[in-house]
Image: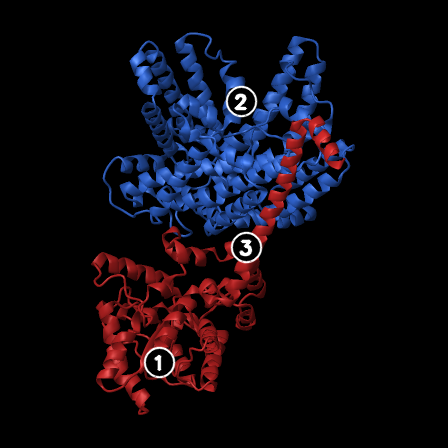
Chain colours: A red, B blue
Amino acid sequence: MLSTALIRRRLITPSFTGLRLNRRRRARSSLIAGVVIFMAANLGLGIYSESNLRIRDPYYGDKLVRLIKKMHEPNHGPAVVMLGSSRAGFAFHGYRIEERARRVGRSLIAFNFGVPATGPVTHLLYLKRMIEDGARPDYLLIELLPSMFVDAPDGPREHYWLFADRLKYEELTVVEKYGFDSATIHSRWRESTLLPWYGLRFQLLGRVIQSWIPWQLRYDWSRGTDACGWGTPYKEVLTEDERKHALTKAHDEYYPVLSNWMPGELPTQALHELIVYARSTGIEVKLILLPEGSRFRSWYSPAARERLRTFVSRLECDVIDAQMWLEDDDFTDDHHQLRRGAEKFSDRLTDEILVPWLNGTR
Amino acid sequence: MIVIPGWSFATAYTEIARSPERIETARWSAELPYFQWLHRQLPEPFFHTQAFLLFFLVVAVAYWLVPRKWNTARVWLLVIASFHFYAAWNASLALLVTITTLADYAFARMIEKAERPRLRKFLLFSSIGMNLGVLCYFKYRGFFLNELHTLLGHFGFDAGYRTLSPMDILVPFGISFYTFEAISYTVDVYRRKIKAERSLPHFLLFILFFPHLVAGPIVRAGDFLRQAHRVKRWNWLRVQIGLQLFLLGVFKKLAIADRMAVFTDGPVGSPGPLLMPELHNTSALWLALLAYALRIYCDFSGYSDMALGLAHMFGYKLTQNFNMPYLAANVSEFWHRWHISLSTWLRDYVFIPLGGSRSTTWFTNRNLLITMLLGGLWHGANWTYVLWGALHGMLLIIHRQFRAWCEDKDRLNRCLQSSTGTALRMFVTFASVTMCWVFFRPEWDKSIIMLQRMFGIYDGLSLPLHNRSLWYTVMFVILCHAVVARGYWQKFWDRAPATVLGIGYAICLIIALVLTPDSSKTFIYFTF
């Protein structure tokens, strides 16, 4: 009876109306499906990125993978990790250091954790993450990059590069403590978690199709490093023009900061916390002022140099002053090292600092 | 008489140019607190921002909550929302648009009532004069005064005023679009093609309706007002079409146009080939021009798609503005596919009144050239845009002459109509149109430098991004055109299950979000 009625109704109703109703139902379902799938995709990536730092902060995540791999190699010695900026990334040649130390009978793991545009706040977060992720170094060498100790008008200079989309939720309070703008970091973190396909797009693109994003927005620097984390310089030799251009760029970026250099309170506090934290976990720490070319060094005014000297002397930690270890030709732009610069620096660092340090004689 | 030494004006200009946000802040401090608050909520009149989407959601929910029988209340709601949309960008200019709209409403009513032809004509010209006067004052004042200044200077006279810089002139968003809509309305009433609108809110909505207010499409009164009077029912199918169009627009804007802008304008802080052609090598300039062709198409058609989509969600169907223009096999066809609402407007209100193609070849060609010159000037108050229009006029004339020449050559015709011939014609049309884009900018000297360097072998900087992503995007756009042109998309859309469509929408939006560059660019056509 029911089926007959249904058939009759189907026969009576013009097919056009039925088609229209069907289409409307399909339209509603497709829209609902679209919204649900879009929200699910965002929720999924948001949760995944919070636990997987290779998505959220590939600078850190990619280096960590290499470090853990190194630590799992058989017959290794103590792990010496260098935390620093891109300068350190190009300077600390892990393989060479390991090789040279082995020649004098010292086995060690030398790992370069240099990441571009980082300072004490980022280094503090990175050390905490390393320990949490089970990659605790035995010896820690931390780069003192003077330009990162200057306060910008709106917080520490690091906040120009360390965005909240690279941070985990619990890390927001740490950066807030060191002067990062609370509203900005919370809104950016929220965006990267609630709408991660947008908020983390450069991280994601950097993993899949790097050539689609300008180099200023690439987060895949750590993927191009060797197994010891050393960032192989792009060029072996520079022409005069290239060097001049690189030097002009460095001058424009650093001269205004260095000519009137003055240490900021918050970055200094972050460094202090980093040292205390490392020591509390049983890690031995040394600080290092990395090599700079003669022109770069001349950008510090006498007063600024004096302030830097005072600042270094007040740090309650051993500081290696390597600023004058290299010649001008060993750099691309008087502060990022070429391969031969990295080799010279690493050799001297191994001989004069690392081996004695590991042997307990320094 | 204002006399300012050249150097001090240059300094002031440089300072102003470096601090447009300071001018904005100063301007907003003079507005009423309510509008200041509104501006903070909706700082930019762009459809793909979070603030706008929230604004749209609020308006759409309120609109559909108003009972069907209160259609006029719904129309009022859209009028108020549209006014707020514009006022959030500039309250004073929103008032100006509203006042001129009210004046057009009154003029049209009077034209309809007037019996004497002379009075009707007088009223028509008053309305057109008012609209063109406002347009000229805001958009062309600087151009005309600066040209007069230069001309007088050539003959050794002092103009008695200083030249105006771009910062001295605030061009209301969309002024060229709504002026043309208003003119077409009064002309149609004068020609008795349509009746003057009696309902004030409906007429206000015709001009102020926010989806088409700032960058078109240029809607016609007869088409729009009929829809405005029709009672709208909630329809999922329309909402789906609307959202789909909106999504398509977002994809074109974020994933293609703004990405191509990185090739043309460079990333933040490093000017690209189109901004600094003198620094870039020859191949970079050619590739940047290709990127610009894609950018301008996806930017403008993306905006139009978003506008159409938004209007659909209120139950309005706006004029289709683009129909795969780069598939055109000749320039005439290109103008039937590119900015359709403008080209049909120019045809109906300039070309045909001038005599159209009814007279001799000479007059037809003259009419074509005048129409395209005006079309060029419509885009921007600069000689480069006039030249751009003239080049298109010349191309149309050449095509017309060539077609006439081919008429009795059967073999050649067959060759041209074959698939290879069609592909060749499409390529030639695309190349010609793309070359014309060199002049589609206000800086004359940059256009010349760009052309010089394109047709020589010059060394210099390469593209700001690896060209792989440019080629992939070009291939993707060609593929999409092929899929739509062959009807595969329509077939898929008709038959695909709801879930598949839903997945498609989600993926499309996700890809658009992932490919969004660092800083979103303004819509190119917002400045016209």
Image position of B11 (left or right of B47) = left
Q: Quadrant of the C terminus of chain A?
A: bottom left
Q: CA distance from mark 2 to mark 3?
A: 44 Å
**Circle on res. A41:** 3
Question: Under tag 2, what secondary structure?
Answer: helix
Q: Position of residue B58 (x, y in %)?
A: 68, 45
Q: CA distance from mark 2 to mark 1?
A: 74 Å
Mark toward the viewer: 2 or 3:
3
Q: Position of residue A256 (x, y in %)?
A: 39, 64
Q: Which residue is mark 2?
A: B345
Q: CA distance from mark 3 to mark 1?
A: 40 Å
Residue B384: quarter of image: top left
Q: Pointer 2: residues within 10 angstroms few (<14), some, or many (20+)?
A: some
Label 1 is found on which chain of the structure? A
Co-location on one chain, circles 2 and 1: no
Q: Which residue is mark 1?
A: A80
Q: Is residue A305 visible?
A: yes
Mark toward the viewer: 3 or 1:
3
Question: Under tag 3, what secondary structure?
Answer: helix
- Taking depth in this image into account, of B178 and A357 the one nearest to the observer is A357
Residue A235: quarter of image: bottom left
The amino acid at mark 2 is Trp
Residue furthest bottom as drawn:
A361
Residue A139: quarter of image: bottom left
Q: Position of residue B268 (x, y in %)?
A: 42, 51
Q: Is residue A328 visible?
A: no
